[in-house]
Image: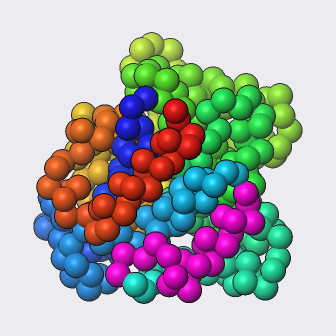
Amino acid sequence: MENAVKAGIFGVCIGDALGVPVEFRSREQLKRSPVTKMRALGTHHQPAGTWSDDGSLTLCLAESLCSGYNLEDMALKFLQWYNAEIWTPHGRVFDIGIATSQAIHRISKGMSPTLCGGNSEFDNGNGSLMRIMPLLFYITDFPIEKRFDIIKDVSSITHGHIRSALACFIYLELALEILKGKDKWDACRTMQENVRNFLDHNPICSQNEMDKFHRILELKVGEYDLVQLYKLQEEEISSSGYVLHSLEASLWCFLNSQTYAEAVLKAVNLGEDTDTTGAITGGIAGIYYGFENIPEEWITELVRKSDIEVLCEKLQKKLMN
């Protein structure tokens, strides 16, 4: 797909930047004053178009993949970002999750990358899901078992629990079907079937763990009954920093919108973890609707737009040509 890398990565960064000024605002507050465009200042007192750790770590992963698949290099890039050496929007880190911060501390002590992420049930923030999009372009030609193993390892650099890995896996399996040119409903149906079949034949987790994803993976009969999730009301969707909430909210926004702009604004205006819900939604919506359908004024306002464009072209050339 032409410009797929640019669509996905700009999609993440723009969704992130739209959410940064209103992070932690409640849904009720945003109903009174909804986000409709790039804003300045707000929660983190940043200029308009500023992305957060979501965008930074996405760009770090993309840059690492330009040199091939290397977990140690990915971990090093995350550490370099944390030390404000690479991929900050304005030369300093202003937002980072607790689990990611703890993982990067372990990286700095020389621990093996796949052991750096916390692996308890309480380590299931959305910090690996928010940055996983660039890996899509590396895994396209691998069988599903290999795709899962790679995704789990890359998630584990900061988030080592199986639930975080599964969330990343589901997200990229859907993105992979979209990359093949399927409409969103066919892509969802194929993703559901592929993931359920994989889980049935590969004992990677307990049934209880699988059941956590029932609102995403439950199959229905009929063309527009494929995803239970999309029929839920807004009040049934949570937008916290918990990885399962983030995945559900992002897919709900994507399925209940008709354009990139509608999807990411719906995501941001859910409130709470606005930058990350915007970033995750933006990645999938960017690939689905294409770079040319991301509003031009948002692209223009994005901080370090030219640097991101150069990186996208480099990754596209490395992995997609």
The part of the image, by quadrant, that contains residue 105 is bottom right
**At 76% across and 72% down in the image, what residue appears?**
116
Viewer-side residue, 198 vs 107: 107
259 with respect to 7 (left or right): left
315 with respect to 210 (left or right): left
**At 54% across and 65% down in the image, what residue appears?**
60
- Protein image colouring: rainbow
Q: How many marks?
A: 0
Residue 175 horizontal/vertical position (percent): 50, 36
Residue 303 horizontal/vertical position (percent): 28, 69
Image position of 157 with respect to 147: above or below: below
Image position of 177 with respect to 150: above or below: above
Residue that lies at the very extreme toward the right in this rendered image = 203
Magenta includes 143?
no
Q: Which residues are magenta?
A: 70-90
Residue 129 horizontal/vertical position (percent): 56, 56
> Is residue 217 in view?
no
> Is residue 180 in view?
yes
Quadrant where the N terminus lies?
top left
Residue that lies at the very extreme toward the top in this rendered image = 222
Residue 291 horizontal/vertical position (percent): 30, 41
**At 63% across and 23% down in the image, what residue appears?**
193
295 with respect to 225 (left or right): left
86 with respect to 121 (left or right): left
Viewer-side residue, 96 vs 85: 85
Magenta includes 78?
yes
Viewer-side residue, 23 vs 293: 293
**At 38% across and 46% down in the image, what residue appears?**
6
